[in-house]
Every structure is written in structure tokens, then in C-alpha cells.
């Protein structure tokens, strides 16, 4: 039951990644194409655009959601690959604890960076 729940979350994380990364790609890399549909905007890499995105709650939330989904999806997949090698119980526990600690650490750091971005953008980087 526990493995099925984790696998379901793995698939759900993949769907979240698909949606949010698709949105990111459309906003950041398809500005010329979107302009054909009347959704024109500034160049995504212009400093003014970067500052506007950094100060937007929508982008902050989507970045944190994308970060969480990508970390879970990737680290759960890596865990499954490592556990297919059929390690002993101690090594299995070390893999679980190590990947969980790594994922939580990276999530905290990435969330801090996303939340600190408006302040950093306001002072010029």
C-alpha cells in the first residue's frame, strides 16, 4: 500500500512538472509565437521582466511547486533505481534517509532562494 501511494505521488508529480514546465517554456521561450495570438510581452531576459517575475506571487508559488515536484519525482526515481540493485536492509535505510535529507535540504534552499528573489532584485542582484 505504501509503495502504491508513493508511486501515485510520483506520477502526480510528473503531471505537475508537465503543466508547470510547459507554462514556463511558453512564457520564457515562446514569446514570439505567443505574440501571434496577442499575448505579447517584454523580452523574458530583460532585467525589468526578471524583477517583475521575482516580485510576482504567482511565479514564486509556481517555482516552489515546480521545485518540489521535480525533486520528489527525480529523487523517488533515483531511489527506485538504487533499490533495484537489491541492497541490504542497512544500505536500503541509508538510501532512504540520505535521499530524503538531500531532497528536504535542496527544497529548503530552493524555497529560500525563491522567497529571497524579490529582495535581491530590488537591490540589483
Image (cartoon, helix red, strand yellow):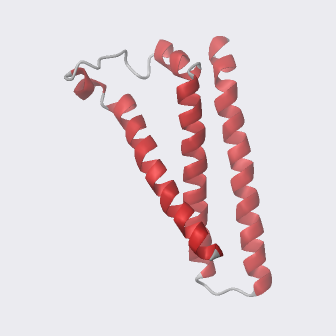
Looking at the image, residue 47 lies above or below residue 97: above
Residue 82 place in picture, x, y as percent: 61, 76
Of 82 and 23, the residue lying toward us: 23
Residue drawn at (52%, 55%) of the image: 13
Q: In the figure, is residue 39 to the left or right of 106?
A: left
Looking at the image, residue 33 lies above or below residue 100: above
Residue 58 place in picture, x, y as percent: 53, 27
Looking at the rendering, which quadrant does residue 51 occupy? Answer: top right
Quadrant placement of the C terminus: top right
Residue drawn at (60%, 39%) of the image: 64
Outermost residue on the left side: it is: 36
Outermost residue on the right side: it is: 90
Count of numbered marks: 0
Looking at the image, residue 18 lies above or below residue 23: below
Q: In the figure, is residue 64 to the left or right of 21?
A: right
Looking at the image, residue 88 lies above or below residue 13: below
Of 62 and 97, the residue lying toward us: 62
Residue drawn at (41%, 49%) of the image: 18
Residue drawn at (68%, 37%) of the image: 111
Residue 53 place in picture, x, y as percent: 52, 22
Residue 16 place in picture, x, y as percent: 48, 49
Of 116 and 124, the residue lying toward us: 116
Outermost residue on the front side: it is: 1
Quadrant placement of the N terminus: bottom right
Q: In the figure, is residue 36 to the left or right of 8?
A: left
Q: In the figure, is residue 10 to the left or right of 101?
A: left
Amino acid at each position: 500500500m505504501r509503495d502504491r501511494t508513493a508511486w501515485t505521488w510520483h506520477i502526480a508529480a510528473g503531471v505537475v512538472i508537465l503543466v508547470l514546465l510547459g507554462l514556463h517554456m511558453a512564457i520564457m521561450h515562446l514569446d514570439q509565437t505567443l505574440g501571434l495570438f496577442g499575448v505579447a510581452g517584454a523580452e523574458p531576459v530583460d532585467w525589468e521582466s526578471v524583477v517583475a517575475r521575482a516580485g510576482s506571487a504567482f511565479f514564486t508559488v509556481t517555482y516552489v511547486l515546480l521545485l518540489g515536484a521535480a525533486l520528489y519525482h527525480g529523487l523517488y526515481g533515483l531511489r527506485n533505481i538504487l533499490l533495484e540493485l537489491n541492497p541490504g536492509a542497512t544500505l536500503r535505510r541509508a538510501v532512504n534517509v540520505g535521499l530524503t535529507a538531500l531532497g528536504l535540504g535542496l527544497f529548503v534552499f530552493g524555497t529560500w532562494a525563491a522567497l529571497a528573489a524579490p529582495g535581491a532584485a530590488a537591490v540589483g542582484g
